[in-house]
Image: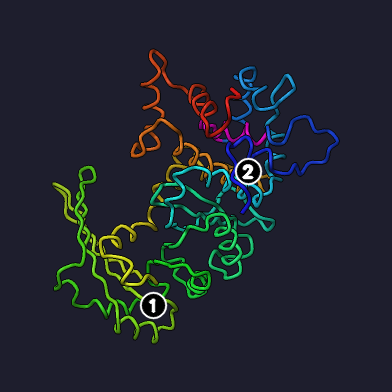
Amino acid sequence: MAAPIATLLDAFSQIDDPRKPRGVRHPYSSLLALTFLGLLCRQTDRASIQRWAEDHWRTFKDALGFTRKKPPHATTISRALARCSLEQFRDVFARWLTSRPQTAAAITAAVDGKTSKQGHDAEGDPIPMLNVFAHEVNLGLAQFPVTDGKPTEPQALKSGLNELLDHYPFLRLFTGDALFCQRPWAQVLLEADRDFLFAVKDNQPELLEAIKTSFHNAAEEPPDAKTVEKKGVEIPTRRLWVREGEEVDYLRETTHFPGINLILRVDVEITQAGAPSRSETRYLIASLSPDEVSPKRLMTLVRGPWSVENGLHFLKDRWWDEDRQWSCRRGLAERLATLRDAALTALRLLPGVEDDLPIRARADHLSRKLPKVKLCPTRFFFLIARSSLFSRGRF
């Protein structure tokens, strides 16, 4: 992997300009930086980014490297962005992200697919995106458009995993929901000397039935781990049972699923005052060695596949209304989705904010430090732009 990059402006400057020299009016890195800052200020699409830039053009024109008197048109932004190399963007973003000390603690990553509903490929089909989210540090690491088939195609997985491990070699464990509980995906991870933890559902009927048989009397046994938490008015209680040893060896041989060393059962019961309780049973498989992970640690890891929904997809829909963003320009939807992922990561790394503060509350937190100033998107922009994450005193 190449040397780390200190700031995002430096990162954008290392992305090749795909445009022909004739007719170029704005530096390519400046267009990328403008789009990124617009997303940070919760602008939802390129038209709103243009209007936002017009309102504040004199303020940041020089700092971003623009030379013309007027900001770029929305069409110029979309044309330039649609041709941006996603491979190069993932590379420079990873080099910037690994320069942050928080990233070093990311040894577990959740993978999850999300379809870009308003972006389409050459055949007019929606484009599935493969997200990689380090749920222990709450950071989005990468996003891969899957244009050659389903997200579980071995070749697509292998090429994406090789690039990911080249950028983040410290990742050791990958978690995923039932979509990723596939033999090719498990084999690719094992060949890369990495571990997996997958949910098991009806898409693997033989495996699921064998696991259920192993846990047929688990409810009569004391759980290996138990947690109770108060989540608003709801109180979820989780109980975990673990199987290992000869029983798992026999299951691995009969189902021909590679690498299984642990099978898990998690019972979730949610109680709420004045309402009937709800319960659910989940089953999972893991390649982790029983000696290197405790039941308490497993209880934390089993929630990884669902962290992407809460920590990434929900926020992108809430902040940018992503599912309803329409784009007719080929290649634009997946690039905007990738920039939104990067913007959320930058917000979480914003200095001077408590680590445990929810991302949506950070703006309110910062506003309290600005006496007699109500925080607005413009003010939020300055807080981001002036931080060491984005620039070195250029604003």
Count of marks overlaid on the render: 2
Residue 306 image-quadrant placement: bottom left
Q: Main secondary structure of the magenta part?
A: helix
Question: Please, what is the three-letter code of the amino acid marked with disc 1?
Answer: Pro
Please check the rendered image and state whether residue 33 is part of the magenta-colored stretch, yes or no. Answer: yes
Residue sitting farthest toward the top = 372
Crowd around label 2: few <14 · some 14–19 · many ≥20 (10 Å): some
In the rendered view, does 19 fall on the left or right side of 166?
A: right
Crowd around label 1: few <14 · some 14–19 · many ≥20 (10 Å): few
In the rendered view, does 258 fall on the left or right side of 123?
A: left
Where in the figure is residue 94, as x and y percent of width and height? 57, 48
In magenta, the rendered stretch is 31-44
Residue nearest the observer in this picture, 53 or 161: 161
Residue identified by numbered label 2: 327
Mark 1–mark 2 Cα distance, whole angstroms, equals: 39 Å
Q: Secondary structure at mark 1?
A: helix
Please check the rendered image and state whether residue 292 is part of the magenta-colored stretch, yes or no. Answer: no
Q: Secondary structure at mark 2?
A: loop
Q: Is residue 331 above or below residue 207?
A: above
In the rendered view, does 77 fall on the left or right side of 166?
A: right
Residue identified by numbered label 1: 205
Quadrant containing the C terminus is top right
Residue shown at 43%/21% (left/top)? 375
Residue sitting farthest toward the right = 22
Q: Is residue 216 above or below residue 31?
A: below
Where in the figure is residue 315, as x and y percent of width and height? 43, 42
In the rendered view, does 36 fall on the left or right side of 268?
A: right
Is label 1 or label 2 in front? Answer: 1
Residue shown at 58%/47% (left/top)? 95
Question: Please, what is the three-letter code of the amino acid marked with disc 2?
Answer: Ser
